[in-house]
Amino acid sequence: MSGLNDDHPSAFRMVPRTGVIFVTTEAQRLGFSSRDPSWCNLGQGQPETGDLPGAPPRVKEVAVDVDDLEYAPVAGLRELREAVAALYNRLYRVGKKSQYTAANVAISGGGRVALTRAAAALGQVNLGHFLPDYTAYEELLDVFKAFTAIPILLEGERGYAFTPSDLRKEIQGRGLSALLLSNPCNPTGKTVQGEELDQWVRTARELDCALLVDEFYSHYIWNAPPGRLPVESAARYVDDVNRDPVVIFDGLTKNWRYPGWRITWTVAPEKVIEAVASAGSFLDGGGGKPIQRAAIPLLEPSAVEAETKAIHTVFRDKRDRMLARLSKLGVRVDRVPDGTFYVWGNIAQLPPPLNDGMGFFRAALGQKVIVVPGEFFDVNPGKRRQTRTSRFRQYVRFSFGPHISTLETALDRLEAIVKSATTAAS
């Protein structure tokens, strides 16, 4: 059919929306605006960005020097790269001989850009990825044709556990040369940490399988050892920063609560950084100078510690409140989240139409509450897996990223929706 007939130019393919973009677009059809306080957005993966008790003051102005009007290096300002390397050495590598330097860091304009650069730099390999996982991985894993995406199913009945022994079997059995994962996991909150994460890194080192670890929620850790800053990273368990096949993605988006700045980084062996920077030269051209320069003070030790502790206090309370109230509504969780600011809720026990993720989403949308149906986390690049219904059709991701007042209002409305559906079903 001609593109003129179906309002889609024939030269272009239909590019699917990620889960968050889909639900936001649907909400906008009903009048949603981020500036409208009548809406409760429990769908977007964004933390509240205002002042928190004990956190450093929010940056509200950014100076622009004359030099900042020029292009920044594709790999990022050296001063910022040095600050990121110092951050990882300070948090995770005290006493270790091998230390990160600026050569181990590339700066990019957002998490998807960092991941896209890495994907573009991969060779003709088998790349493993988990189900469920971050919705944006789906298109990312399909658009680049050099590598083959291999899905690995995690079971809710096992609490989404995946042991080092499981990892070894998957690498050897499927011939994986790389593995992409979010840790803590978006959406389940499952976190690989401590001795288990150490064994993952050892296995990757031994079998030469690159770990591509999305650590954007690595400061939202809810079960960290007492007395230690509640953060975790695979960087803690790397032996040689230039030989171990560990590639880490993080940035200011979640852990510093500056999503609008679009400042992220890749931390990896020097040769990997050279490759992703080369990919950046044709994909995105690099980020802006003023914001990169403004980001440097945010990585100072006192600022990082204060921000992380404030996040832990405020968001831990929101997590506990959301879990308690969802439980009363009949929403079950396979696993209490170890990290992130999400609850991955099983809605199978709710009355129809609320026992279906899309049905729940539509009903909530009618009351100006946004959530994300679980099927969007059933990452299926190119739709190669032929399934009529997703395994995660009866799941919903709820975010406790927004302010507590928004959270409570949203949960009040969801409670009313469930009560109404229960009455109608009886």
Image (cartoon, rainbow, N blue to C red):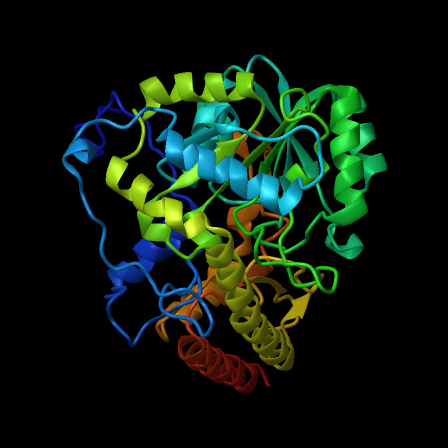
Q: x%, y% of residue 106?
A: 44, 29
Q: Is residue 383 visible?
A: no
Q: Is residue 422 or residue 340 the one in the foreground?
A: 340
Residue at image position (27%, 28%) is 72
Compared across the picture, whether 329 is left or right of 311 comes to: right
Compared across the picture, whether 38 is left or right of 323 comes to: left
Q: Answer with the quarter of the image where residue 96 lies.
A: top right
Q: Is residue 151 visible?
A: yes
Residue at image position (74%, 65%) is 226
Compared across the picture, whether 78 is left or right of 331 comes to: left
Residue at image position (68%, 51%) is 191
The residue positioned farthest toward the top in the image shown = 124
Q: Is residue 283 positioned above or below 27 on the image?
A: above
Q: Is residue 163 or residue 39 the one in the foreground?
A: 163
- The quarter of the image holding the N terminus is top left
Q: Is residue 416 positioned above or below 50 on the image?
A: below
Q: Is residue 306 or residue 126 the one in the foreground?
A: 306
